[in-house]
Amino acid sequence: MDDLVTRFFRLCTEMCVDIGNIVLAQEFLRPTDNQTKCYVPCDAYAHLLALLVKYVGCVTNTAIKINLLNKVLGIVAGVVLQDDQVTQTTLNNMPYHRIIIRLFIDLNAAEPVFETINGQVLTAFCNVLHILNPNKAPAFVNHWLSLISQRFFMDTILYSKEKKICEIYAQLLIELFKFLSPFFNDECLENEIDILHKDTLQLLEVLLDDFPEFLCKHHYDFCGSMMIDCIEMRNLILRASPSNIPMPSPLTPNLIIDKLPEIAPPPCISNSFANNLDVYLRNGSTATLPSMLVSDLKLNETNSTFNYNVPLINALVLYVGTEGINYINSKGRFLFLTAILNQLTYPNSHTHYFSCLLQYLFNVVKEEKIRKEISILVLERLTNYPDCPWGLLVTVIGLLKKPIFEFPCRDYI
């Protein structure tokens, strides 16, 4: 019986997609008419699935409803992955997009039966989108991004009372950043990747405007999943600040950062960095930490771009002082300094600490080439001024204004 149910849903999914693709291929219709006709079978199928989830079992038996939903979503995902492997193209994925988003909207209707299983429904959809992430289904990437950017989907997920659902959504964004990052090694982005990059920037701008606390909490993980060249995306993330914290202009005359009340409290961030650090500290002595950086931060993987453990560097930078920078070679310092720059966000104690740390490093390092590396990294992030993080602007202004640094007089500036 279970095999028959699985086959039924699979055939229905394939039929909807085939009908939708036939309609989309009709050249004598306008594109909008094609889309409207494509939506008809997809919407009908999604409504059928929603009704089955609603009425299967009794009202109190939520497990059977969620099991059915997981089965249906798993079948849809399986068909998407199969098509992705066969076609290797980004075309004609609209029917899948429509089925998933229409089913999501129907199952989040204001009905008592759906309200009792709301958290499990959201988790099921986030899980299926994780299965279909761009690294596993690259041909589906544009419609996948459209799904996680859809306004009703975003609002429902990010306003959810269950914190774990927001964590899953954050993981979806990390998968997106990991997919995009390698393409930034090319001098010129291909057209499709360029469009994907612009759509990602639009998504980040929406999050920056409407969900800044979400970006603040996860900035550590988001920035850690990007390549060094993703400056514009990184700056958008680091610009986020909680809506209840005022942002004094870094250009304010006689601004004394130490006196700002916002500098006292630490920021709200994810705890993933602490897990990395705890594992490290359990296996070694903290007294020898700086001298162990060279060997312990390196990876044995030959396919890694820098051969360094980037997440561990990002975790250590929250606790390590100034000694380690003199023990690492230029590639390691590059990542180490980048991790410091990733902490320069809105006014808070971490931003203040790392702003002071970076300025202190610039002053006390033994070699001029390290100062040059600091300068290059800082100035690179100013390329899209004024859309830069508050902490970065404060740091640059500090380097420019304080005579002890002689920053404008350096030959490489």
Image (cartoon, rainbow, N blue to C red):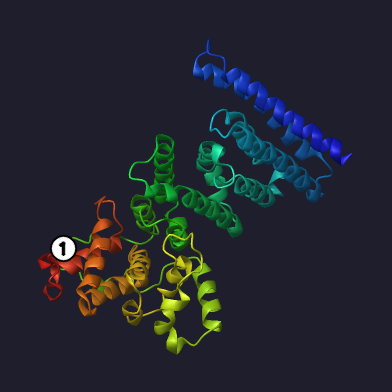
Q: Is residue 259 visible?
A: no
Residue situated furthest front in the rendering: 302
Q: Viewed as shown, does residue 131 lie left or right of 362?
A: right
Image vertical order of residue 227 relative to residue 5, above or below? below
Counting labels gives 1
The spot of residue 155 in percent (x, y) is 53, 45
Residue at the image point whose x is 71% and y is 49% from the top: 117
Q: Mark 1 sits on what residue?
A: 412
Q: Is residue 124 visible?
A: yes
Disc 1 marks a residue whose amino acid type is Tyr
- Name the quadrant containing residue 171: bottom right
The spot of residue 410 in percent (x, y) is 13, 67
Residue at the image point whose x is 11% and y is 73% from the top: 403
Q: Nearest the camera: 66 or 81?
A: 81
Residue situated furthest top in the rendering: 28
Q: Viewed as shown, does residue 350 lie left or right of 312?
A: left
Residue situated furthest right in the rendering: 1
- Name the quadrant containing residue 50: top right
The spot of residue 33 in percent (x, y) is 54, 16
- Mark 1 crowd level (few <14, some 14–19, many ≥20, 10 Å Cα): few
Q: Nearest the camera: 124 or 320?
A: 320
